[in-house]
Image (spheres, helix red, strand yellow):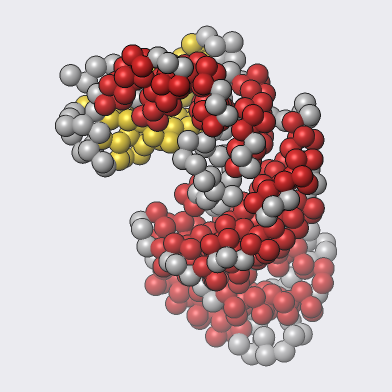
């Protein structure tokens, strides 16, 4: 469920197509249990084996296509009936190489019906074909061709049920203003439930799409179904409770809120998720408590700080809002919204001078750093990424900002340099800074530098 207020940042709940992971085809390769599924090459299939193997290794798609087509011609008579599982499987592989996923799907079904022991081999073929199409879609999306990306995701969905490609197809349909088709893809993503976190996101995307169509009863039903199917999924349970609030059943939702706040086994991210849900349900004091629990686990988490300050404003706990937003401005001096939060809080605690100072400092920013987040990347790897937005008249100016990475005790474990070129006012560019550290990293801070 998307946020209705801009200040609180949800984690897994926001619609974020670009965050979907790239799945290389190599992940689909698994060791075959040859004793269960034995395929025998014979004179009728030997040439096809040779051509398919060679085609798979070629970089020239035209030459590869020609070889796949020749292999299919070799196999035509052998796949006229269901007697030869080897020929059926090879023909399916050739069709996958050609991108003919519907034909491959039918052949793999026939292959397994002839020899049920080959279910795993067929599954591997399906996954590898799916992964190729998935990567094709990602590449098309990265160059801005949404229609080609959608076509590739839909092709992938023919061969293998994976929530990622269904969910992404739904998001692209939404981008192309075809919400009904988006709803269908989101439902398929939830049903596939592979991987579960993508299925959960799809259930939230489904709810959002249904809500945009005015189908509120279906919204609640969809979120309830996923929550009941995944009783240990905190985010699923929270979003169902929010749907209950929206539909007017606040009493039932409060039971969920109370139960979640009593838990002592949640992570920082999960407490942030609970807090966002409570915030969406207008339970601002409870949201503050959830964000407080997140900060008890990691006082340096940007999301928990920002979300607590925003919830404190809504709860009219202005002293707390001033304290936390003041820390945000100190640690993240290029966060435009942090200055806004601080000015708001200062104005409510009768500190007009402090509010004016915050507004002036915000206005003096020649750029701001937006949507910044810290992520772990592999073993001992971390990355800070976000967007730099131009806000002044210093387009093209170069600036270097030191980023201090802090350990769980708040000590600076490492400092890396963020090198930027300030975009024109109103325009933005992505940035990323990587760090490898044997010391665990809990958070980061930006040092304030002059751009003059």
Residue appearing at x 44%, y 77% in the figure: 66
Is 238 displayed left or right of 157 in the figure?
right
Using the image, determine if residue 358 lies above or below residue 315.
above
- Residue 127 lies in what quarter of the image? bottom right
Given residues 341 and 106, the one toward you in this image is 341
Given residues 13 and 119, the one toward you in this image is 13
Q: Is residue 181 visible?
A: yes
Residue 302: % across, % down: 51, 26
Is 32 displayed left or right of 406 in the figure?
right
Residue 325: % across, % down: 47, 21
Residue appearing at x 61%, y 83% in the figure: 75
Given residues 54 and 401, the one toward you in this image is 401
Residue appearing at x 43%, y 66% in the figure: 176
Residue appearing at x 50%, y 74% in the figure: 98
Using the image, determine if residue 400 lies above or below residue 235.
above
- Residue 237 lies in what quarter of the image? top right
Given residues 132 and 328, the one toward you in this image is 328
How many numbered discs, if any?
A: 0
Quarter of the image with the C terminus in it: top left
């Amino acid at each position: 469920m998307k946020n209705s207020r801009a200040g609180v940042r949800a984690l897994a709940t926001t619609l974020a197509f670009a965050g979907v992971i790239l799945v290389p085809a190599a992940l689909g390769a698994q060791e075959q249990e040859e004793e269960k599924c034995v395929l025998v090459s014979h004179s009728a299939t030997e040439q096809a084996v040779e051509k398919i193997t060679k085609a798979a290794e070629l970089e020239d798609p035209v030459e590869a296509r020609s070889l796949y087509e020749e292999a299919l011609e070799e196999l035509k008579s052998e796949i006229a009936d269901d007697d030869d599982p080897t020929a059926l499987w090879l023909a399916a592989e050739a069709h996958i190489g050609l991108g003919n996923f519907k034909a491959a799907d039918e052949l793999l079904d026939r292959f397994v019906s002839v020899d049920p022991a080959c279910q795993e081999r067929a599954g591997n073929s399906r996954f590898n074909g799916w992964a190729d199409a998935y990567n094709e879609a990602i590449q098309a999306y990265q160059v801005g061709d949404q229609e080609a990306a959608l076509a590739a995701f839909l092709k992938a969905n023919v061969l293998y049920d994976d929530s990622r490609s269904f969910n992404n197809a739904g998001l692209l349909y939404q981008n192309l203003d075809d919400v009904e088709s988006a709803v269908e893809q989101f439902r398929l993503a939830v049903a596939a439930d592979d991987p579960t976190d993508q299925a959960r996101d799809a259930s939230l995307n489904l709810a959002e799409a249904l809500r945009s169509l005015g189908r509120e009863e279906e919204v609640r039903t969809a979120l309830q179904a996923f929550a009941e199917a995944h009783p240990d999924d905190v985010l699923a349970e929270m979003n169902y409770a929010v749907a209950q609030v929206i539909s007017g059943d606040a009493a039932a939702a409060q039971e969920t809120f109370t139960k979640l706040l009593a838990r002592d086994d949640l992570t920082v991210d999960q407490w942030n998720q609970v807090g966002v849900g409570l915030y969406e349900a207008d339970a601002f004091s409870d949201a503050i408590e959830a964000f407080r629990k997140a900060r008890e686990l990691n006082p340096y988490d940007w999301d928990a700080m920002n979300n607590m300050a925003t919830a404190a404003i809504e709860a009219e706990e202005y002293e707390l809002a001033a304290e936390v937003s003041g820390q945000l401005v100190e640690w993240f001096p290029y966060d435009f919204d942090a200055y806004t939060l601080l000015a708001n809080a200062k104005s409510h605690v009768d500190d007009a001078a402090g509010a004016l100072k915050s507004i002036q400092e915000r206005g003096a920013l020649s750029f701001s750093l937006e949507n910044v987040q810290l992520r772990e990347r592999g073993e001992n790897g971390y990355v800070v990424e976000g967007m730099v937005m131009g806000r002044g008249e210093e387009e093209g100016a170069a600036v270097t900002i030191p980023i201090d990475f802090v350990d769980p005790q708040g000590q600076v474990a490492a400092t890396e340099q963020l090198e930027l070129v300030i975009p024109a006012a109103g325009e933005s560019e992505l940035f990323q800074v990587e760090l490898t550290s044997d010391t665990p990293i809990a958070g980061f801070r930006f040092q304030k530098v002059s751009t003059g």
